Structure formats: structure tokens, C-alpha cells
Image: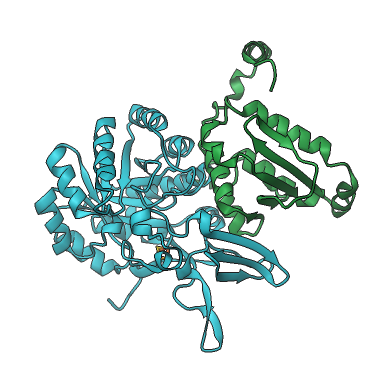
Amino acid sequence: MSLPFKLPQQLPDFTLPAPLAKLGDRLPQLPPTLALVTGLNLGLGRLIPREPLEPLIGKRFLIRVTDAGMSMRFAYGARGFRPVFDSAPPDLTISARARDFIALLAREEDPDTLFFNRRLLMQGDTDLGLLVKNTLDGVDLPRFDPSRLTLSELLHRLRARLATSPGAV
Amino acid sequence: MASSFELVCPAGGLPALKTAVDHGADCVYTGFRDETNARNFTGLNFDDKSLKEGIAYAHQRGVKVLIALNTFPQSGNWPQWTAAVDKAAAFGVDAIILADAGLMEYAHRTHPQLRLHLSVQGSATNYEAINFYRERFNIQRAVLPRVLSMAQVEHVVKNTPVEIEVFGFGGLCVMVEGRCALSGYATGMSPNSYGACSPGKVVRYEETPTGMETRLNGILVDRFAKDERAGYPTLCKGRFEVDDATYYAIEEPASLNTLELLPDLLRIGIRAIKIEGRQRSPAYVGQVTKVWRAAMDAVKRDPDHFTIHPVWMTELNKISEGQSATLGAYNRPWK
Ligand code: SF4
């Protein structure tokens, strides 16, 4: 019997091997943090609207990728996101496994579902977390259509993107 | 007997709206980004631009858009609610969902062409109340509070010309919609006027050696042991110490799931099934809409041989609050 609908091709459930968490702990946390804030800053003002994020100005965040032993500390200011180097307490800490962060970004999982299942924890100022979650949920991403993914299409997009990039982020 | 019913899906933002439309919703319900609706959470809901785009997207695909204006204005802020009614009318929504009788009177008088739905927050549980709203304000549809048994729902449907909509799936309020003062008592912000039960600014989660604690304005609502499923930090579903025992003193957190009642709901003439969850993400909206579309189509095709596909239940259980799914008040066989 065929299923009444097609099951989504979902991200498989995985946990990174435990030694990695210990190892990750001892690695410098700056490179992943830089990658994260650069990514966020790239989206700011384009995909992610700035205006609703105003209450985040001056706030500190900590993202903990538990199974990778990764802790990314950053702050938001008028000029965007930047890494922070001290260990002053963050205003909001979000902890989850790598797999679940990826699934959230891909919009495959609902954060409340992960929270009910104890796979996502938000500590600190919950309202900041809601603001981030709802702002990201409100971002209307362009539909991903694999049939349009030809080389010329990619080049075209890249060119368009470079043409509109502001000089500095 | 009605031969059809509509699937009414939640949308807290434009991507959720599009997801609902793409997965087979007949109607999508939304709200403005303020306290005029009962899901007034930080960053949630529609600004003018996204609402306009959402309505165009839905209408191009033959899907209706409803706006919930289902909180109760107070004398000091009345103009904010009437402005919201005017705005919804100007945007060309298919209906507005109201709870306050004064606002119904305003909407009926000012926009006689605009379709009015009675919100679950209006707490109308009997046909006399519903017919009263029909007679005075010409409401076209009423959403029943989740307190009635199946027999009582049928009794209402039989005695009113107003279309009846019921909740099919999602989180449960303790079942006195529009009248709950619990959250307001703890936080000073009533869900009925402020638009949010347990607003984020008063919610705190904390991992402690004995488990994850959730607090509402400093009040400990629950403590979840490691790996125990968690629920929203609502007072009605907290565990409290009463006479030396700690338990769910008001209501056990469970999620409503009425898939198995679909043939009966169709038979008794229910016109629409509502899915709870405007606060949830597009992923949830997509998952629930897909399952309910498939189930409702199956029931319409052959109501006598409707069976629940196990995959539907697995999908729905995954995304639910609480330990269990319940038929809620619908299932009171003795009634
Ligand atoms: S405390 Fe419970 S019953 Fe009251 S409004 Fe919140 S969810 Fe509903």
C-alpha cells in the first residue's frame, strides 16, 4: 500500500560522537563564532530585517552546540553581530545538538517540538529568544527549486549578489 | 448533513501562511502584530506588507484568509481595536474572528459586508448564545469552545443556522476560553486583554541539578526530570504541591487530536476544523496541514470506511505538547 502522502526527506537523527565534545571544548571557539556572525551579518538588512531586531542591541548571546563542545559568544549592536571575548554572563543561551540546529535552520523542525522533546533549551531572557525565533520564522526565503540549479543560474545569482553587496559588512 | 468541511490552519507569519496554503489548507487564520489578537508574542504575526502579500498569495490559490481580533478592548484602548477592524476590512480579508460583543456591533454597523466569525474566546457554548450573536450582529460562523461533548456539539449544530467550527488539533487551554484569569493573576497581563498567556518576558527556563525548571514571573510552574517531555509554562498545566502531594493540580498537559472523530464531525454537519498553533513555526504548520488534509480528503471520499493511517498519528504525536493526545471533552460517552 502506498502512503497517503510522501514523507519528507528529513535530516536523519544523529549525535556527534562523545569524544568530539571533549575535543571541541579545547579548540579555539573564535573561528566558528566568526563564521556564524559573518553569516548573520550577511543576512542582516537583506534576508533578516533590522528593525524588529532593535531590542537585541547591546545584548549578549551564547550558542552551545552540545555534542560538538562548541560555545559561540557574540553580541548584537547597531553595526550588527560581533564575537565577544570575555565570559560575562549572556542575556540568552540557546543549547542544542548540531543536528537540531541544522534542522532548525533548514526549517525541518519546529523549535517548540524540540523544546517539548528536551532537545532545545533556552536560558535567560526568553523574550529575546522568542523575538529571534519569530523574526527568523517570518523571513520569507526564496523557494528552493532544484530544477533551476544549473551552472549558469548559479553564476547569474552570484553575479547579481556581488553587484548588490555593500562594500563592508 | 454537510458534505464538506474546511481545514482552517494557523499562520504566525508569511512563511507559515504560504506553507499552510501549499499543503492544502482551505483557510488560514492570522493576526496583526499587537494585542488585538490572542497570540501576541514578541516578533510574531503580520505587519501590513506581509499581510498584503499573504492575502494575495492565498487568494491566487483559492484559499481564504481570516484575521483574529479576538481579545477584549478596554475603554481606554477601544480605538486601537476598531482601527484593526477597519484595516482588516480594507485589506480584503475573508472574515474577521471576534470575541467582544461591542466590537461585533462596530464591525457589523461599519462594514456590513464583512463576514464575522465568533471566536472561541467568545466562549459561546450553547445555541441560544450563538443565535443571539447571529440575530444582533449577523455572525456567519462560531468556533466552539473545547468544553462540549460530541452529543452537545451535535445539539448546537442542529439548532442554529450559523456554521459551526471546532478545534481538531493542538494545545489545549484549560477549557474556559476567554475567561481564564490564571496567567493574568500571576503576571498582571491577562490573555483576554493583553493577548498572550505566559508572555515571553515573564517566562524563565533553567537547567538545575534536579531538572529543568520553568517559572512564570518567578512562580515555579514545573520541574521536568531529565528526558521527561516538557510543556509550555502555563499555570493551568503546572505541577503544584497540594496537601503534601505534587501533581497536575488543574490539568495534565495533553494535546487535542480528534482525527478519529472526523467521520462523526462530518456527519453531524461541522463546517470547519481548526488547527491550533499560530505561535508555532512553518515546520509545524506544514507537518500538521499535510496530515489533516490527507485525513479530511479520505473521510470525504468514503466516510464509512475511514481508517487512521498510523503515519498520521506518528507525525502528529511528534509535534505535540505534553505526554499524551486526548479527545478532550468530545469524548464523554455518558452524555
Ligand atoms: S493559563 Fe491555561 S487555561 Fe489559562 S489562558 Fe493560559 S493556557 Fe489557557
Is any atom of residue B198 visible in this view?
yes
Residue at far left of view:
B135
> Residue placed at 66% from the left, 29% from the top?
A41
**Residue A46 higher or lower than B75, as above or below:** above
State the green chain.
Answer: A
- Image check: A152 left or right of B145? right
Q: Position of residue A94 (x, y in %)?
A: 67, 50
> Residue placed at 49% from the left, 68% from the top?
B253
Q: Position of residue B152 (x, y in %)?
A: 24, 68
State the cyan chain.
Answer: B
- Image check: A2 left or right of B60? right
Quadrant location of the C terminus of chain A?
top right
> Residue placed at 43% from the left, 48% from the top?
B278
Q: Position of residue A4 (x, y in %)?
A: 49, 45
**Residue A26 higher or lower than A51, as above or below:** below
**Residue A112 higher or lower than A144, as above or below:** below
Is any atom of residue A7 visible in this view?
no
Depth check: give the residue in front, B159 or A41.
A41
Number of numbered discs visible in the structure rendering = 0
Depth check: give the residue in front, B66 or A82.
A82
Residue at far bottom of view:
B243
Depth check: give the residue in front, A37 or B51.
A37
Where ligand 1 lies, by quadrant? bottom left
Q: Position of residue B134 (x, y in %)?
A: 13, 52
Color scheme of the displayed model: by chain
- Image check: B255 left or right of A129? left
> Residue placed at 15% from the left, 55% from the top?
B133
